[in-house]
Amino acid sequence: MRKTYNRVDDITGSVIHVQAEGVRYRELAQITSRRGSSLGQVIGLREQNVAIQVFAGSRGIATDAEVRFLGHPMRVPFSHALLGRTFNGSMIPRDKGPELRDNLVDIAGPSVNPVKRIIPRHMVRTGIPMIDVFNSLVESQKLPIFARAGEPYNPLLARLALQAEVDVIILGGMGLKHDDYLFFRDTLDESGALSRSVLFIHTASDPVVECLLIPDLSLAVAEQFALQGKRVLVLLSDMTNFADALKEIAITMEQIPSNRGYPGDLYSQLAARYEKAVDFDTAGSITILAVTTMPGDDVTHPVPDNTGYITEGQLYLRGGRIEPFGSLSRLKQNVNGRTRADHRTIMNTMIQLYASFRETLEKQAMGFRLTPWDRKLLKYGDRFEKEMMDLTVNIPLEGALDLGWTILSDCFDPVETGAPSAIVEQFWPKKA
Amino acid sequence: MNVATGKISSVNGNLIRVNFDGAVGQNEVGYARVDDTPLMSEVVRVHGRQADLQVFEDTAGLAVGNTVTFTGRLLSVQLGPGLLGQIYDGLQNPLPRLAEKCGFFLQRGAYIEALDPRALWAFTPTAHPGDCLTAGDTLGTVPEGLFTHRIMVPFDFPGVATVVSMVPPGSYPAGGTVATLRPERGTERDVTMIQTWPVKIPIKAYAERLRPTETLVTKIRTIDTFFPVARGGTYCIPGPFGAGKTVLQQLTSRHAEVDVVVIAACGERAGEVVETLREFPALTDPRTGRSLMERTVIICNTSSMPVAAREASVYTGATLAEYYRQMGLHVLLLADSTSRWAQALREMSGRLEEIPGEEAFPAYLESVIASFYERGGMVRLKDGSTGSVTIGGTVSPAGGNFDEPVTQATLKVVGAFHGLSRARSDARRYPAIDPLDSWSKYPSIIPGDAVDAARQTLRAGHEIGQMMKVVGEEGVTPEEFVTYLKGEYVDNSYLQQDAFHEVDSATGADRQRHVFGVLHLFLKAPLQFPNHEAARRFFHQLTQMTRDWNRQVLNTPEFKEAQHALETMIEESTPDA
């Protein structure tokens, strides 16, 4: 039987301090007070003084609360019984199912040895031309969706989850509105995908510390499935809330902030989560799609900025469309050379011309005389936006490539596109 | 030596405070015990009888009262034959052997010797008993892949060493004695093929440092022609995320004309390292016909690996680079990214509660960065041969804004600046090195005046482009419009390279000289067109043809034919003088 302690010295934010001996860094504690019981984690040791971060927040905790150390770090029960279930950040069921206690695995485990990773080679087809053609999604990729608060990022995330061919879907919701949580649950349910999903949900009204645990829980479970050879897709929404929770705790702990109040280790904290995306040598894979809302639509804000340096590209969602500039899949080269010979040509040519179209739009807005070339670009840009960029477009990759050639040949002569002559010869539609 | 021990009194993240007995040195290595696992740590501050240590591993499970044993050594690496082709973590643990031992995950507290002391090497002695040598002089050689690996008098050997005995030629284990040396005072010392050296101290066993003047060919046209790097020089690549820093580094590591490449992947994505370590063994080095891996050492401390070891990884890389330089080789050290290393410093500084400087970086950031880049250089060794360490570091400035402490501290100490621009990368112009902002203090492979003329065209073209945004195309004269198109043409057909095309991704020095010569003539040609539209069409065509030309293998009939077609086209649009 482990010793219990009954004297809380200090309560600040969600952190309490007790005097205790033999406590290990990062171990869990059970804190029981008049208002109920909560788990907490040791986040600092100074002589006998132990700092504990209480998952349910410190509200209602009294100085005589009972603190019992459990001798192990945070764990998650892993089994196939998780599928179809919903939990909160303390692993308490949100649905009506039973609590799970068997086969506990540590969360936030060590990182994968790089030599046990393989180069990802499998494209994840989504039916969205802006992704399939221009920024192909690759199994084991970590890709954030950068968006302003009002954009339809959650529907996009749900659509990607349903159209991608994966074995297991794990949703980690952080600071979700309750409606959004119900939206995800119902969408997965209606399409029959709930039975291969696990949901870890922290809603905006839940204690902030639980928000911090969501990515670790989700990824620890994902890792176990992947080790069993499953292809796992992890959806995280919204990582900005996660970063804000980190900020809140750091400030409470009186850490020196580095940039706009965020702690200096924000990059490492985010990286530790995103780097769980992996394609294992001789086992399964983890692909991560994460929403990062950009406060003030500002990509230089510390959260999207640090995220961009960690992830393998990013998708910008702007005005309900995936923006072709800035959006980038760093792994696309691993797959788009082996789809169809014209894939890369279409990808580069159409984007370069679309960039010229944007310049022409500016010119037009300034009231300059438009040249014949400008008019060609305007026609092209308009069709590109309507037929390729619109998110309702749902066509397979090959269809999208053919469509690309049709649009190009309707608007330009072959030399104007700058596409390599050999490819033009083979794919340029022959006029009847 | 008296080795101290201590007990943990506090734990805060990866910083522990230890009450110790005995003598403890700054930067000394200690091991903190958690259960039976020793966690490697380094002393970063001493206060009375208390020492603060940064732990190179996850600190979960440590408790107040756990023992810490100090070692009396600084953080060191092993140097000897067998380093090439290896993949190490920041503390020089060989990752493939770690995977054999621990499986998929990196287990903390698992340390493996960097070099196998039992591995046999064919040793040929070159020194003789009675010779008087100093630190860094060659005792004998072993063949390592392509190179003759020199076994040298240990770099820390004080004063003159008299050779007492040498083993005869033959096959010996790396950890076995090959020579016995007698110092001026003190006892005789046995020397093996492996020596250790503290990573944070530069190796200085050479005759003198030279000025870097020889261009290092990277086969990237923008760099070699416009913003060259010299052997023994230093350069930095700052850029926002997604601008192509890592692609640039990867291509440089493949194509650069150097003997050895040390890649320090520091706090970046694991996937990128995986590409290198899976692809390099299968790629052949065009200069030698051998696998690229045979000239490469990878130091890999990716972003999810422990933060403190990130700082160590760049120094480990620098030390290995200096070691091969001591053999008269030209070494390129690529550090990606130095910002992550600076952030590791910032995290530690914050935990130590030091007074923060700009953006919470520690006040000593600049001097730390400067002393790192100063480890690059061209040197004349004691035997008269030369060796060099060239350092290329990427910088990941927050928000892509170069006015931040790490970029600014770096710019002060490097010889070339390859600034990547978001606008260029958004427009898919690779490499995204900004042709107007970047600079280099090193000599180009192409005579200066020709480069200046092209740069002039780029600048003028850019200015006219800006002007047209205000006054429109109709507001500029036909001559100005042609200059604008010429500037775009230089950009589209020379600066930009297709990173994924077999031929276009790497342009050798000869080809650059040839192509640039032709381009130079084009730029001088007084082209005339009836109107803007005709000029635009002409340049569309010219760009397209030049790009096709870039994709042809040098000096093949197709190459010559494409060049001829280009020249004809220019002639036809040039009015007779």
Image: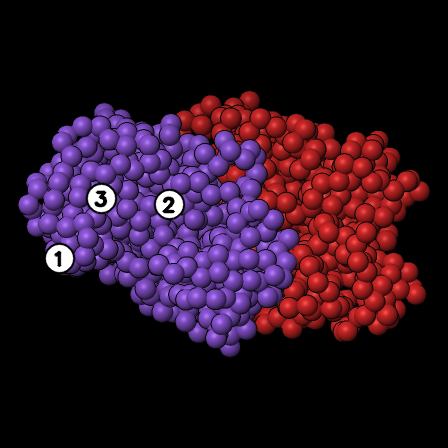
Which colour represents chain B?
purple
| Image mark 1: chain | B
Percent x, y of residue B116? 35, 35
In this rendering, position of residue A61 left or right of residue A14: right
Q: Amino acid at mark 1?
A: Glu
Q: Say which of A417 and A209 sits in front.
A: A209
Q: Is residue A274 above or below residue B440?
A: above
Q: Say which of B316 and A351 sits in front.
A: B316
Q: Which residue is at 11% across, 38% downward?
A: B126
Instruction: Residue under label 3, please give it.
Output: B191
Q: CA distance from mark 1 to mark 2?
A: 39 Å
| Image mark 3: chain | B
Q: CA distance from mark 1 to mark 3?
A: 16 Å
Residue found farthest to the bottom: B355
Q: Amino acid at mark 3?
A: Val
How many numbered marks does the figure carry? 3
- Callouts 1 and 3 in the same chain: yes
Q: Amino acid at mark 2?
A: Ile
Is residue A397 in view?
Answer: no
Of the numbered discs 1 and 2, the one sitting upstream in the chain is 1
Task: Chain letter for red, please.
Answer: A
SS class, disc 3 = strand
Instruction: Residue under label 2, please give it.
Output: B263
Residue A395: image tag: none
Q: CA distance from mark 3 to mark 2?
A: 29 Å
Residue B184: image tag: 1
